Amino acid sequence: MDTHTFFLSLLIILLTARLLAEIAIRLKAPSVIGELVAGVILGPSLFGWLEPNEVLRLLAEIGIILLLFEVGLETDVKRLVDAGRKSFIVALGGFAVPFVLGFCFGYWALGLSSLVSLFIGGTLTATSIGITVRVLSDLKRQQNKEGQIVLGAAVLDDVLGIILLAMLYEFSIGGGVSMANVSKVLVFVGAFFLLAPLAAKLISLLIHRFDSLSGIPGLIPTTMVSLVLFFAWLAHAVGAPELLGGFAAGLALSRRFFLPFGIALHTDENFANRIEEQMRPIIQLFTPIFFVMVGLSLNLREIDWSSSFIWSFSLLFFAIAFLGKFAGTLLIKESWHMRTVIGLAMVPRGEVGLIFAELGRVSGIFNNEIYAGMIIVIALTTLLPPFAMKWYCGRYANLS
C-alpha cells in the first residue's frame, strides 16, 4: 500500500468508527457496535472501499493489546472478594455452562472439530465488564447489592476468560490440545499474579522519580506503552498470546489490585489515576481500529443466507450464550427479580467476545460462515441486554 493511500484509509477508519460509535451511543447501544458496523460498511460486505492489510492488522494488534491493558487496569480483584461467594458462583456458572454447552453442541450436534468447538465455547464464556458497568451506572445500580455481585462476577469472568484465551491460543498454534503448553500458560499467569504488585510498586517509584526530573512532558504514556509492549513481547516469548501480556501489565498497575495472601504492595492511587488519565487518549485512538478490522474481515456476501445452517447456528448459540449466563444465578439465594437483573447484566459479550472470535478467524480455526455466525451471536448478546435491562428495571423498579 502506498503511503498516501494508507493515510487516507486510516483517516476513513478513524472518522467512520467515531461517527458510527456516536450514533450507537445516541441510540442507547454500546459504542463497540457502531465501530463493528463501520468495518462492515467499509469492507467487502457492503461498499468494499477498504480491505485488511498487514499495516492495519498491526495497528489493530496494538489496539487489542492496549484494550486488554485497560481491562487489566480497571480490574478490581478486591471487589470480587468483597462481593463474596455469590459473585464466585455467578461467575463460575456463567463461565462453565456456556463453555460446556457451546463445545457439546458444536462437536456432537453440528459435527464440528474439537478445536472449532472449543473456540465456540470459549467465545460464549465472555462478559464485557465495560458494557456491564456502563448499563449498571445508567440505572444507578452500580452500588446496589446486585451491582456488587455482577461487578465481582464480571471481574472473575475476565480473569478466567483471559486464561482460557491463552490456552486456546496454544491449541491453535499447536494444532491440538497440549497439556505441556497449558501448564506453561498457567505458570505464566500465576507468576504475573505473584510478581505484579512488586513490579507495580517498583515501576511507580522509578517513574515518580524520573517524572519530577524530566524536562519533557509525556513520560508516563511513553513508559506505559513501552511497558505494555514489553509485557506483550514477554508473553509471546513464553508461548502465551501477546494479549495476556497487555492484560498482565494493566493488572500490575491497577490501583485496585491486591494479592489475597496479605502481602500485597499497593500502588500509589494518585499515580494509578494519572496512568489511566494519560493513557486513555492513546487507548481510545487505537482500539476502534481493532473493532473496525473485525468488520472488515467479515465478508457477508460470501455467506449463503438461504442456508439453514447460518440461521440455526446463530440462533442455537445465541440461546446458549443468553441463557447460559443465568446458570449461576439459579444457585444463589436471592429474589427472582435480582437473579434476572444479574443474569441480564452478565450477558453482553462485547469486545471480549470479539477478541475470541477474531483469534479463531486469524488462526484459521473459524471459516467465514462460522465466524459470521459468531459475530451475529456477539452482536445480539451485546446489543439486546442493555435495552432488556433498562426495560425490566424500569417496569419492575419496586421489586426486590
Image (tube, grey):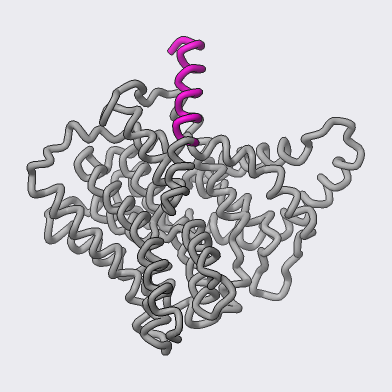
Most foreground residue, 224 or 44: 44
Q: Residue 292, how many percent across, how many down?
A: 41, 35
Q: Residue 145, how many percent across, how many down?
A: 54, 80
Query: Is the magenta region chiefly helix, strand or loop?
Result: helix
Q: Which residue: 60% across, 78% down?
A: 82
Query: Does residue 153 appear to the left or right of 385 in the view shown?
Result: right
Specify the farthest residue to the right: 213
Quarter of image, res 51: top left
Quarter of image, res 46: top left
Please state the extent of the stretch shown in magenta in the rendering.
Answer: 1-18
Most foreground residue, 152 or 159: 152
Q: Which residue: 37% across, 55% down?
A: 382
Residue 169 visible (yes or no): no
Residue 346 visible (yes or no): yes
Quarter of image, res 316: bottom left
Q: Which residue: 31% across, 40% down?
A: 361
The C terminus appears in which quarter of the rendering?
Answer: bottom left
Most foreground residue, 121 or 44: 44
Q: Residue 396, how many percent across, how many down?
A: 40, 79
Magenta highlight on residue 11: yes
Q: Which residue: 19% across, 57% down?
A: 315
Q: Is residue 58 depicted above or below 231 in this figure?
A: above
Across the whole image, how many numbered discs are drawn on residues?
0
Most foreground residue, 120 or 289: 289
Query: Does residue 221 appear to the left or right of 9 in the view shown?
Result: right
Magenta highlight on residue 270: no
Q: Is residue 241 depicted above or below 17 in this figure?
A: below
Q: Residue 327, how many percent across, how many down?
A: 32, 76
Query: Does residue 304 appear to the left or right of 206 in the view shown?
Result: left
The N terminus appears in which quarter of the rendering?
Answer: top left
